[in-house]
Image (cartoon, rainbow, N blue to C red):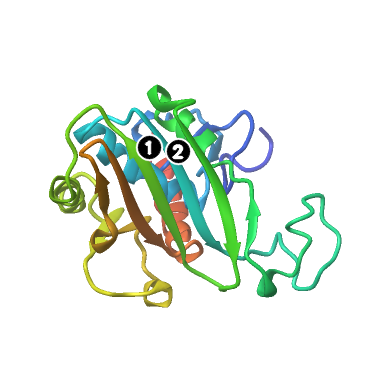
Amino acid sequence: NSGAKKVIVSAPCKGAINIVFGVNEKILKSSDQIISAASCTTNCLVPMVKVLDDNFGIERGFMTTIHSYTNDQRLLDNSHKDLRRARSAPSSMIPTTTGTTKSLGNVIPKLKGKVEGISIRVPTPNVSLVEFVFSSNNSLSVEKINNSFSKASKSELKNILSTNNDQLVSSDFNHDPHSAIVDLSLTKVIDSKMAKVSAWYDNEWGFANRMCDLAVYSGKLK
């Protein structure tokens, strides 16, 4: 109350309102002082999930983020409260936890408890990939799913979500400002009821862009 008028936290934060810019920033009020921008992975997953749930309805889902290593890990085997994160980041694929699905439930309450997830930290310095598998009671097809993402990328989620249909790899998405770049070539469907979608994201630069968007937006509230 006697310092900064507003604080935006680049991680999930107890007692803070959770905002994924492009999805639910309109619930912000000028009186909100501590704002959580969730996380880079949440900012990738939530726009994807919103498109899928709005168009098809999500019954349940599971997310895997194949995530570049971060400064919470160790370059060489060392100490850490998470024994797996204590292992050398450039030398191993490291399964670990993620708070993304909990944050998802805070942003889209009707999906609370319906989506779980895991993070696999890999020996790359930047850019990550979300793989989201979900089931729906409605009929699914690769064409329908990809069309829904293409439409959203040109309308309500423009500048937040984009699509890619080229044979690219993670390093091609360095400095991409979008929260999620859905790789249409990787969409798969089984028996019209279960599907997998994939999205790249620059977990540093892309998320930093959303932090800036959120700061500008919250600063204009009256």
The dot on residue 77 is none
Is the residue 12 above or below the residue 211 in the image?
above
Closest to the observer, 29 or 174:
174
Q: Secondary structure at mark 2?
A: loop
The numbered dot on residue 19 is 2
Q: Residue at x 71, y 59 (%)?
A: 72
Q: Is residue 23 visible?
A: no
* Spot occupied by residue 14 in the image (x, y as percentages of width and height): 64, 31
Tags 1 and 2 touching, CB below 8 Å: yes
Identify the mark at residue 25; answer none if there is no mark. 1
Secondary structure beneath label 1:
helix
Quarter of the rendering containing residue 139? top left
Q: Residue at x 58, y 57 (%)?
A: 120
In this view, the residue in front, 73 or 156, is: 73
Residue 32 placement, left or right of 47:
right
Looking at the rendered structure, the kind of residue marked 1 is Glu
Q: Earlier in the sequence, mark 1 or mark 2?
A: 2
Q: Residue furthest front?
A: 191
Residue shown at 74% from the left, 56% from the top? 84
Q: Nearer the viewer, residue 217 or 160?
A: 160
In the rendered view, tell whether residue 192 sits above or below residue 76: above
Residue 146 in view, yes or no: yes
Amino acid type of the residue that numbered disc 2 sits on in the rendered structure: Ile
Q: Name which residue lies at 63% across and 64% down.
A: 70
Write down the quadrant of residue 115 in the picture.
top left
The percent position of residue 116, horizontal first and vertical second, equals: 50, 36
Q: Position of residue 215 (x, y in %)?
A: 46, 49
Distance from disc 1 to disc 2, alpha carbons, whole Å, reads 6 Å
Left or right of residue 76: residue 71: left
